[in-house]
Amino acid sequence: MTFDPHDLLADARIAVLATIKSNGLPQLSPVTPYYDRDAGVIYVSMTEGRAKTRNLRRDPRAALEVTSSDGWAWATAEGPVTLTGPGADPHGPEVEALVDYYRKAAGEHPDWAEYREVMVSDRRVLMTLKVERVYGEKIR
């Protein structure tokens, strides 16, 4: 069977997001990605004010790496990033983007009103990484 790094990205529930710090060094953060393979984008919900968000506002390029559960395969996606949010209105477009992300990644939420309020109070931001390059390897 041929290894396809896109499959590993699509199955991943935990990843490492690499952004670029102001001094040029990478900043790495564990994240929960959702890869929309048909659209060619990876979504990640993050909080305004965190290092990764600040880095992406300054330099909107990122790489996201995932590893198989047995550790013998990995895949990396790279590309430009756009950030949506944070939103001040629980029914505004910024929060709607986070609702859409959640539905794609996890299905229906048991309490959408609560989810919307938390997205506003936590100052959540939706990162969209346009996948321009994917590479990886299966070692065994």
Image: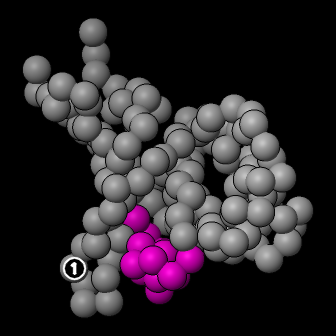
Where is residue 26? Give x, y as percent. Answer: 25, 73
Which residue occupies the extreme bottom position in the image? 23
Measured as percent of width and height from the top left, residue 76 is found at 31, 47
The foreground one among 123 and 98 is: 123
* Above or below, comparing residue 53 to residue 44 in the picture: below
Residue lying at the far right of the rendered structure: 91
In the displayed structure image, the side of residue 107 where residue 105 appears, left or right: left
SS for dot 1: loop
The picture quadrant where one finds residue 95 is bottom right
Q: Magenta stretch?
A: 48-62
Question: Left or right of 137: which side holds 87?
Answer: right
Asked whether residue 85 is in view, the answer is no
Query: Residue 49 magenta-drawn?
Result: yes
| Relative vertical location of residue 138 with respect to residue 19 in this rendering, above or below | above
Left or right for 91, reference 40: right
Q: Is residue 22 left or right of residue 50?
A: left
What residue is disc 1 on?
25
The residue shown at (53%, 42%) is: 34
